Image: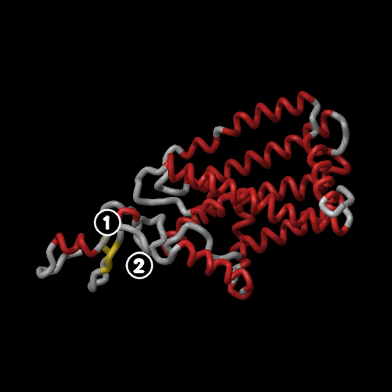
Amino acid sequence: MRVPDDLSTSAVHNTIPIGTFSTHPSGHIRKYPSSGYATPGASSVISNGSADRIGCFTAVRMTALAKLNRYFRRLVRFRQMDFEFALWQMIYLLVKPQKVYRNFMYRKRTKDQWARDDPAFLVLLSAALAVSSILFAWTIQLSFTGFIAFFLWVVFIDCIGVGIIVATLLWFASNRFLRRVGDQDVEWAYCFDVHLNAFFPMLMLLHVLLPLTFPHVIGFDAFLPRLFGNTIWFVAVVYYIYITFLGYTALPILKNTHIFLYPITFLFIFYVATVTAGWNISQTAMDFYHIRAENRYA
């Protein structure tokens, strides 16, 4: 951008924070040194915050509270949700998760945020949890009240509650130890989206495949049933870790994201130990689920 003659260089730096973009009347976008991203076709709108905190990972168009408020308002507006696109994401999370995160990059360039602004994925995930809860209720012979308790536990504790804890821990660790630069932050909502992405394939394995195969294949005290059941658990947790790794690797401001893969080594050792020791994890899990659901209303 060419600075007009009547405007000094110092004045430009005093009016435009470092790391942001401005649009010249000619239509060209100027990029300032500390930020590597621009919003195509428009200038950024700066939200509350000091100049040294401005970056592509802070709320440049809306505050985090405003984004959260808009997200929850859309939860009751089903006609505004793109269920077809959310279903596409679910399918690719099972077969090619890298493609899903490329879409997250596109959202960052067009909407100035990494996290989803459409709750359609969360709605479909809740529907999948409801269907899987029916499978579990049939497999472990739950009563109707036990089924309701099981569903509420799975949605609000196993999925959302654990997701909030995991997202908060990884959000803190990423911003504290993995950032390349200090003026750009990882969005907490994006960390929660990464958890939801990783949770869905794990759900398909542990809440669909497992209850379907447990009565006839896994639920026996023998080596092969134990091997098959423990393998399902191992693959499910490894896939959760792998998709989490892909999610944080997609963020260009983070470094050393390969550390997210380190737990796989310990998981493999644990997997071999459980099979060798004769521990059928699936049987233990089924007993736990039954006690948790039925005793909730005992």
Residue 157 left/right relative to 42: right
Q: Secondary structure at mark 1?
A: loop
Q: Can residue 95 be seen here?
A: no
Q: Amino acid at mark 2?
A: Val
Q: Is residue 97 above or below residue 43?
A: above
Residue at image location 25% in from the left, 63% down from the top? 16
Q: Amino acid at mark 1?
A: Ile
Q: Which mark is residue 18?
A: 1
Q: Which mark is residue 45?
A: 2
Name the foreground residue: 187 vs 101: 187
In the rendered view of the protein, which quadrant contains the N terminus?
A: bottom left
Which color scheme is applied?
Answer: secondary structure
Residue 82 placement: quadrant: bottom right
Residue at image location 81% in from the left, 37% down from the top? 284
Q: Position of residue 260 (x, y in %)?
A: 53, 38
Q: Give the class, few, some or many, for how many residues have Cα within 10 Å of label 2's Cα (few <14, many ≥20).
A: few
Q: Secondary structure at mark 2?
A: loop
Q: Position of residue 244 (x, y in %)?
A: 56, 45
The answer to the question of whether label 1 and label 2 lie on touching residues, with beta carbons closer than 8 A, is no
